[in-house]
Structure formats: C-alpha cells, structure tokens
Amino acid sequence: MGRIFVFTGKGGVGKSSVAAAHAVKSAQMGKRTLLVSTDMAHNLGDIFEKQLGREIENVLPNLDLYEIDPSYVCENDYREMMHYVDQLMGSGQQLSDMGMIPGTEELFCLLRIADLYQTGGYERIIVDCAPTGETLSLLKFPELLSWYMEKLFPIGKVGVRVLSPISKTVFKTEMPNRQAMNDIEKMYQKLIELQELLKDRDICSIRIVTTPEKMVVEETKRNYMYLNLYDFNVDGLYINRILPKDIANTFFDQWIEIQHNYLHILKDTFSVLPIYEIPWYDEELKGLSNIKRIVEDVLTGEDVFETKVLSQRDTFLQTEEGYELLVAIPGADKADLDLYRAATDIVIKAGNFKRNIPLPNVLRSYEVAGAKYEDDVLRIRFEKGE
Ligand SMILES: Nc1ncnc2c1ncn2[C@@H]1O[C@H](COP(=O)(O)OP(=O)(O)O)[C@@H](O)[C@H]1O
Ligand SMILES: [Mg+2]
C-alpha cells in the first residue's frame, strides 16, 4: 500500500527543502517516490536545478517530480463542469479563472494527488504544500465538500436530472448537461476518496515544519490544533534553521539564546511527536548536494517513514447514560471552544475554525447533555431526548 506524507507549515520555514530531502532519502531507499508541489509558488525545479514542465518528470532513479498546475488539471479533467459553473456565475465572471473561491487551486491539486495515489504506482508520495493558511482551509473536509456542493450545485444531484426539462423556465438557469453532470459526479466521488485517503492513519502522515521563533511557534501550535480538530494524523515535527552554538561572532549570541528558548517551548509543547532538528546551513539549499546535507545530518534512520499513530480518531463510546463523543484537540484554549447541534451534525468551533461531525443514526434522537475539555480531549455527552 502506498503512503502519503504531507509537509505543511508557515511560508518560508523550509517545507520544500525538508520535503525534497525526504523524497531523496526515500528514492535512495529504493522506493518508487513522487515529490509533488501544490504551492503555486513552485520551487522544486529550483531545488533540483531542473526546468520542469506541466507533467511528471523523472529526476533521479526512483524519484519523479511534479509541480501541479491546477488550471491545467481543471481544463483537462473537469472541462465540462467548469464550463457549466462559468455559465452559472453569469458572463464576465469566470470561476475557471480560479481564485474566486478560496482553496480552489489546492483542491484540484489534491484531487490530482488522489488520482496518482490510485494509478501512479508510487510507494511514497511526498507532498510539498502551500503555506499553512491556504492548506488548512483546504483540509476542512468534509465540511468544505458540502459547502462546495451547495454553492455550486444548489439543486442537488438527483434534482438536477429530474428537473432538467423544465429547468430553464423554473430556475432561469441552464442545467448542467450530461457531460458536466459526469464531471460533477466524478469530482464528488474523488473528494470523498481524497478525504478517506488523507485521514487514513495507515496511509497519510502529516508533518509540520517550523522554526524556533515566536511567530512561527504560535502558528505551529494553531496548525497542530486544527489538524487534530479535523482528525488528521500529525506524526512528526521538524525544527529548521537552528543556529549552531559555536558561531564565533557575538552578533548571534542573543539570537542563539532566543532560539534556545523557543526550541525548549517547541519540545515541551510537542513532546508526543517525533522531533527532528535541522541546522541553519551556511548557504541556500539549492541543488542535490545541499538537499543531501539534510538527508545525511537529520534523516539518518529509515524510521522517518514510519507512521506513528499519535492521536485517536474521533470515538463514540457507550456510557451508562447514553453516549460520549471524544475529539482530540491538543492545545486548544478552553475559552475558544464552542459546540452546538445543527440538524444531524454536531458542530465544534475552535477559534476561527469549525467542524461538522455527522452523528450516527443511533444518536439522532439524543441531545447534547454536556461537554468538557480535559487532557487535550473534548468529551461531548449525549443523552436520550425527551
Ligand atoms: N536549514 C536551512 N539552512 C539554510 N537555508 C535554508 C534552510 N532551510 C531553508 N533554507 C532556505 O530558505 C528558503 C526557504 O526554504 P523553502 O524550503 O523554500 O521554504 P518553504 O517551502 O517553507 O517556503 C530557501 O531559499 C532555502 O534554501
Ligand atoms: Mg515551498
């Protein structure tokens, strides 16, 4: 079974460099590996000093590179659907120009990755992500999924087909044709597959790259919390750009101390995760020889590709009074947590993020009786309604 490793983190912390080092290491181990970038500011070509096109290219034995161009993917795989969507939006506005809906670009990139996972024959797919903010908004599946579907195709799948003959007069809009419908269904199916892939703890590992400085540490904590809230398995932290202690220049004394402080905080906060420390090198990490420095200095054991299941998936437990739902949300601020029931979902809010968890049928007649947040886990109690 193939594995997927997703490298995420704030912009500029070293995601591409660290992802590239893993890809090189993986290929060296004889595993058929794909390094793929979903960041619109692609730089894998720079790192491997190679001009890359829009298709997959082989750069080393066992190593392929791929800088995804989402508009190209969209044009090739979802042409009819996008054409329909453009019509819906009316003339002048073109959704297929992208950027109109947040996350669209990365969404098409991730869909392509799900495809490659199924058909590409890769043992490992290493994903070099766009900066946290963009990726996070994307990982909000399935909430995003239903959001897209409602916004883009408000009438619903079945309805569209049944209503098609009268649609023009009733809805004053063009119904998607058969071909567009096929694309829509294809995308819907792929989104579901993608979600299953990314949340499967035996398949997908999420790795966070960070640096020992205040702003980055703060974002790393939030990122980790949200990834857990959405039920992804984070199983590695990479602390990059650590200054060597023996620099003979007093200019760095204070910086070394500052870093030391944040290193301490990171190790403390993320003590459950395997942590890798990467030195600040004396030059940019361009070219294979520089990437190999990370491989040799940091990724020495082969266990960097082992999955460690560190957080429980959402669990429903039966209790004497009813049921309990356990959701791991490490490092959340209690005051920022909120939850409510919306139709057949339970909605958890943490800061700016919110997640809908569909309730199993058996709980539909139950009510939320209380909740507490303890040891990084939110426990929600359900009791039988009146
Ligand atoms: N440990 C390091 N030592 C020296 N330069 C680094 C290190 N990590 C990253 N860089 C450099 O910092 C820049 C940003 O790194 P990159 O991997 O592209 O980050 P990201 O993908 O997170 O934006 C690049 O020029 C890279 O060569
Ligand atoms: Mg990058």
Image (spheres, rainbow, N blue to C red):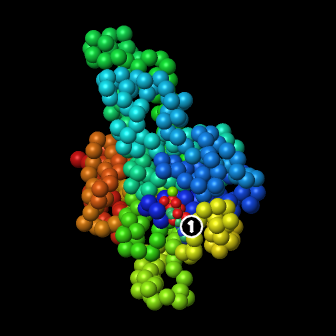
Q: Is residue 311 visible?
A: no
- Mark 1 vs ligand 1: CB under 8 Å? yes
Provide the residue designation for mark 1: 284
- Kind of residue indicated by mark 1: Glu
Q: Nearer the viewer, residue 338 or 92?
A: 92
Tag 1 secondary structure: loop
- Residue 266 to residue 115: above or below: below
The residue depicted at 51 percent of the width and 73 percent of the height is: 241
The answer to which of 367 and 70 lies nearer the viewer is 70
Residue depicted at 63% across the width and 72% down the height: 298
Residue 146: x and y in percent read 38, 38
The total number of labels drawn is 1
Query: x%, y% of residue 56?
Result: 64, 42
Task: Tell me the quarter of the picture where residue 353 sits.
Answer: bottom left
Q: Residue at x 50, y 23 (%)?
A: 182
Image spot of residue 383 (x, y percent): 30, 54
Q: Is residue 353 above or below residue 282?
A: above
Residue 36 visible in the picture: yes
> In this rendering, is residue 196 above or below 189?
below
Above or below, 376 against 362 in this view is below
Measuring 47% from the left and 53% from the top, which residue is drawn there? Answer: 130
Task: Name, please, the residue furthest toward the left.
Answer: 386
* Pointer 1 local density, CA inside 10 Å: few below 14, some 14–19, many at least 20: few
Residue 47 screen position, x and y as percent: 60, 58
